[in-house]
Image (tube, coloured by chain):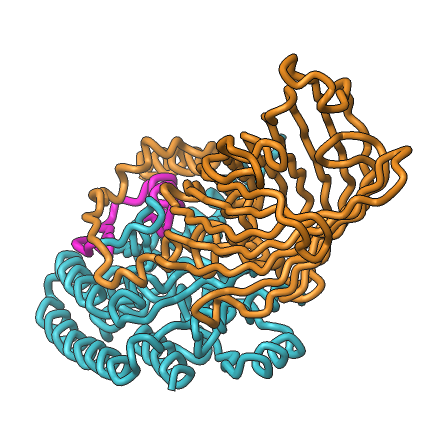
Chain colours: A orange, B cyan
Amino acid sequence: MKSVVVSHFAALLALALGPTPQVLAQVFGEPTPEVRAFRNLEVEQAASERATDSHGHGHNHAGGHGVETESLFGFILGSSTEAQGTREVAVETVARFGKRESNYSALGQKLEFAYGVTDRLTVALGLLGDYHRIAEKPAYAGAVVEVRPRYLFNGFGGEIRYNVVDRASAPFGLTLHLEPSLAFSDEASGLRGRKYGSENKLIFDREVIKDTFFAAFNLTHEIEMTKEKGAPAWERGSVVGASMAGSWQVAKNIFLGAETRYLRAYDGLNLGAYKGDALYLGPTLSLFTDSHRFLTFAYSGLVGGKEKGSSRGLDLVNFERHHIRLKAGFTF
Amino acid sequence: MFTRRHLLAVAALLLLPLALASAQAQQGGKVDVLASFSVIADLVRQVGGERVEVRSIVALSQDPHDFEPSPSDVRRVMKAQLIVINGLGFEPWADRFVKAANYKGERLVGSRGVKALSVRGAVDPHAWQDVENVKLYIENIRDALTKVDPAGASDYARNASAYGRELDALHRQIKAGFAAIPKAQRKVISSHDSFHYFGDAYDVVFLAPQGISSSAEPSARDVAGIIRQIRAEKIKAIFFENALPQQLARQIASETGVKISGKLYADVLGDDVRSYAQMMRHNYQTILGALK
């Protein structure tokens, strides 16, 4: 009896002191279980997605029941809108380099706050920033007004996105995207003044392969009225375009893709005199995290198009040679 | 500092004489079996019949996932002649429990031999949600009881065989019932993460509710996400571990037409389901009724 009591006391002491799992793992002698594959692949997929689906608010970027496509591509947008009550804060930077007549660097930034008013309607407000550095090339001396490097607060922007057709319940998604802005400098020349503009898009997209491959098609109509400081009159211009993109989920939450944009520039708001066209092509990369952060990078190089009346290749008067877009944000 | 562990030790020491006396009183009586939780306890009862006295370590009101042994649980271990757990990592406390109590009796991992599912890199322990798996549990329990109580071997074999036939019938019934539903319609939303074996065995896809934490009451925003998911996946029924507020349930039902369906039992038996077979039949009938 004494030995029983002693050993029992020792065991109770072990319980009190919390013996190490390594020692105790031997007690039940459970062998490592043999693991089998799921018989039903759809059940397996649903099981594997639970970790990311169980928390959050429906803004599921990569995997599960509806990848959010708004920021899945690069310059091209997807049709998704924020779920009702969802908020998003994002910083978008678009850099443009390379003009024919100048050493041209321009960078437009937007700090944006978006809100899902309903599942179908998202509105956003943003603060705009602008950087320009324009130096003339010797061969074109006097052709452009130089802009010394400077960064300035450039006004306000907004966004209204209305999802007309929900991709979840139709073969494709369709969203009307309006992006009005009030700026204090001209986007092209970098000169101070006043600019009213709006970039309007009709966005189509489709989930070609579930959770894996997505395609988008945008029709674009940009209008702007600009009056540079000291200029006698307003200048009006517009750009129309069609663009398409594809994005493939190469690893969890990582999408690689490509996109191409065809743009035509006109004088006037109603597609007046044609000025030139441009064809851009480039890769895209989008990263998402389970904690609803995202990062989208896109590069577009000018590969085609021509200025009206010019015998030279590529329209580097109305467009730039290189475009880079970087957008990072999070939803909550 | 006098910690909870010290309290456990002192309490167990005080209970020691009583436990020893009780253990002696058991000799010649029923086989004393300790099961880790209610589902395992019922399986032991089905095989052991009148020859065994089965107690569950985890009470019906407790979540087996969160269970921590108390001093009174230590006393139970002292009495037991056989301890049965599910295994597959479901009872991480079990090893520490028996070691600390210096338990020398028989112990059984009920799921021994089951080919487990791996979900997100971890073994899913809820193997009992596939009735076919439980037939292996029954064989294991029969053998363990026979080892502890050889005199009851024929009883255990007879009980196990009869219960095995009941499980076969139950498995066929569930299979046939879901087979009558088009496969594309066999999708439900469940906040519980315990039905992978059930889904794989009976071809029912259990999708996680988007935007819903199992512990938090869903907000209107969460509900909007669920409605979107229901439409996208053409869901017929949703099951929530926690009761959905009536207003939100009505909103989901009115906007999507799906049923906010009843409770599913995953890890513990309850007042509505007093046995494993009842639990499986209840879950099957509840899901089937919602899908029809």
Where residue B139 sits, quadrant-wise, is bottom left
Query: Is residue B44 something one can see in this rendering?
Result: no
- The answer to whether B51 is drawn above or below residue A11 in the figure is below
- The answer to whether A228 is drawn above or below residue B260 in the figure is above
Query: Percent from the top left, x then y, of residue A308?
Result: 58, 41
Magenta span: B89-115
Residue at 57% over, 53% down: A56
Residue at 71% over, 47% down: A237
Instruction: Please state if B224 lies on the left or on the right of B272 as rendered.
Output: right
Q: How many marks?
A: 0
Residue at 82% over, 33% down: A153
Residue at 61% over, 56% down: A201
Q: Nearer the viewer, residue B104 or A106?
A: A106
Q: Nearer the viewer, residue A275 or A86?
A: A275
- The answer to whether A70 is drawn above or below residue A295 in the figure is below
Instruction: Please state if B156 lies on the left or on the right of A245 as rendered.
Output: left
Query: Is residue A111 something one can see in this rendering?
Result: yes
Residue B108 counted in the magenta span: yes
Residue B256 counted in the magenta span: no
